[in-house]
Amino acid sequence: MTASNPLHDESPTAPLDSTAHLMNRISSQLARQLTLVGPDGRRRPSLPALVVVAHGSRDPRALRTVTALLDEVRALRPGLPVHLGHIELNEPLLADTLATLGDREAILVPLLLGRGYHIKRDIPETVAASRVRGRVAGALGPHPLLAEALHARLTEAGWRTPDDEAGRRTTAVVLAAAGSRDPESKVDTARTARLLAARLGVPVVPAYATTASPTVPDALAALAARGRTRVAVASYFTAPGRFATQCADQAPWIASAPLGTHPAMAHLLLHRYDHTTAPATTTPSLASA
């Protein structure tokens, strides 16, 4: 699909393509002004722009959620130019967002939870085809902040870790993710499952809505066969959408909401931005980076 370029929509009567387009334009204009002059009145180097790269979804709730999450990022880091670009399905598309930035420096942080084709190929190729001096951060996961957000969402849905050993032996969690053909994506999801299990004190089994195995129903059946009859589904999705809804509907007990605008998500986006902006040092482990 093709999105219109905001640079071509400067007429005061031209319709705005979306709220996200409007926020991109305002953020770009204000950021350029705010970062040019320091408190002492002297010109200072501008900060690299933060470009959050979302996948895109046909579910209108997804764009609303991502837009609200970027508002939280802006509130945490006033003066940082924050932009949104989508890989597909929603405007603004990433290529259009990068076009608005010209040849300035940018850090692209994927709103994606594990390694896969989009991070390894799609996003770098889009950057290479633009004029932006861009660097691409790694996936958001695995990271303890994601385990914190997952735990919080489960608690909101009614999760309580059993106090007794008998209760713990019949309780488990399925970590429901989208799925990818990239084996490293499964490695990342499994690491997140271990981080969450350490918080909950019960087994957490990764499962997938599509492409990878086991599926969520298969994971639930396997747990039931082992006597785990009190099983929650933890939604390992960044925003509402078809797969998140499908997985929640399969839960035999409770299902948590997607990660969405949990405060840990905004902090993690900024952490990935800062880590990518900082001079290269030793590479930390994925679980603690």
Image (spheres, rainbow, N blue to C red):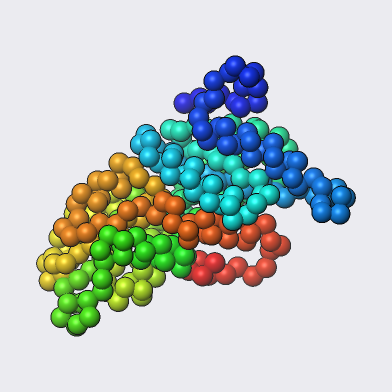
| Residue 212, position as x, y percentages in the image | 31, 52
| Residue at 34%, 60% in the rendered image | 153
| Residue at 41%, 62% in the rendered image | 149
| Residue at 49%, 42% in the rendered image | 67
Figure check: 26 above or below 162: above
Q: Quadrant of residue 126?
A: top right
The reply, left or right, for residue 123 in relation to residue 146 is right
| Residue at 32%, 53% in the rendered image | 257
Q: Is residue 3 visible from the viewing direction of this image?
A: yes
| Residue 65, position as x, y percentages in the image | 43, 44
Q: Nearer the viewer, residue 81 or 226?
A: 81
* Picture quarter with the C terminus: bottom right
| Residue 263, position as x, y percentages in the image | 48, 58
Q: Quadrant of residue 159?
A: bottom left
The reply, left or right, for residue 165 in relation to residue 243 is left
Figure check: 208 above or below 122: below
Figure check: 280 above or below 90: below
Figure check: 59 above or below 140: above
